Amino acid sequence: MGRGVVDQVATMTGLRVRALADLDVERAVRAFTENGWERAQVTVTDREGEAQDALRRGSAVATADPLLVPKLPLEAVSECTGDPETGARVAMEAIANGRHVVMLNVEADVVVGPILAEKARQAGVVYTLAAGDQPGAIFEMCDWATTLGFRIVCAGRGTVLFPNDHHATPETYQEIALRNRMNPKMYNEFRDGTKSQLEMVAVSNVLQMPPARRGMHEPHCSWQDLGKVFSLQVEGGILEAEGVVDMANAVDASGNYVHEDKVFPGVFVVVTSEHPGVRSAMGSLFEPGFGGTAQQWGPNWGLFRPYHLACVEVPMSMARAIFSQKPTGDLRGGMVAELVAAAKKDLTPGDELDGGGGYTVYGLSEKSEVARRENLVPFGFAYHGRVTRPVARDQALSWDDVEIDRSGFLYRLRAEQDRLFSPVAGQPASGLTEGG
């Protein structure tokens, strides 16, 4: 994703990448040299002074230190690692130095996004998720809908989840991952459902719309039937309430991947209106080729964008932040949803937690008040630590089930966030307590 952003910006006018961090610093160097920079124009350093000098003389900077980049005189920083601890550190360092933050690291956002957004506002900079990724594309659709006065019934994305995928391990899809030059564990985070669940938690927190239920319904659904399926139960749909997020699965109940009319890899918003004139206009405009007569006359209309362009569109969020000081999705207030950790298998005391795409846990969306009440572990803290008592497969982990290092930056920042947005001012909003 990060390399894709660099490639796209290289084709644009008005933006330029000047510094890159990668643990394999030669990958950062190649990202420059394969996008028009001469090797002599790229300074490799982990020293701030040397990097500052390089930028002043017009060179590019490649480093293995992720915390160096946000200290440099740049307009915006994009964090793309997917590691929650690293993402939180880089974002906070950028905000402290007056840089806009374009966050591709949704894994960090679903843990500490609200406080990062609040600190950015206080610092006069923008904290934003990225256009192109499904959350950004959903925000753009919802902004369109609410600007026009529609009421949002449901917002979501397509996904591909086969039976038992929640229990997939890195070996399950290793051949496909390696064929696509991807880390099998990282690829498996997409396959075991964690990635799509966490993205919808991010959507919930920006839109202030909770998941329909734990893990969402995720029914098999064609794009033509979005407005019918994601309606209230009294209207023949599956929802108990409006104003929620959910997903549509391209896999049917028999485990068949249905290519025709699938929602994946697109995004959608289901809207409604009480105004008779608007209903009449939508009925006449919603022709059969756009969604079929089944939902032509409402009461809900499923609007569908059949693609998201991932790294290709990320520079739009950079441009919005730098030139308009606007985010792609305005995150304000506390969390309405939490990504919680569920057991991939029966866990026993001593088992080591290994995060998204690993062997022990997968992520599920949940309403934040439920997660607080049940003392559930936010998924961002399930990348390390160990199990202290038996946990049955598919059971959500509570803080009483695990032993986790509470000295890290991510933990401290989340504890501060919980105090800031607690239902009871100054009191923890979850099982986190500063200092353990």
Image: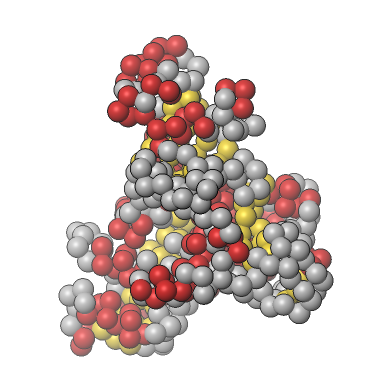
- 49 or 316, which is in the foreground? 316
Residue at coordinates 45% horizontally, 47% vertically from top-left?
A: 250
Left or right of 20? Residue 335 is: right
Q: Is residue 365 above or below residue 235?
A: below
Q: Quadrant of the C terminus?
A: bottom right
Quick check: can you spot residue 194? no
Q: Is residue 84 above or below residue 321?
A: below
Left or right of 375? Residue 32 is: left
- 117 or 30, which is in the foreground? 30
Quick check: can you spot residue 255? yes
Q: Hey, which quadrant is residue 379 in on the image?
A: bottom right
Residue 313 in the image: x percent, y percent? 32, 55
Residue at coordinates 56% horizontally, 71% vertically from top-left?
A: 169
Residue 75 in the image: x percent, y percent? 35, 64
Residue at coordinates 76% horizontally, 79% vertically from top-left?
A: 350
Q: Is residue 394 above or below residue 386?
A: above
Residue at coordinates 64% horizontally, 32% vertically from top-left?
A: 240
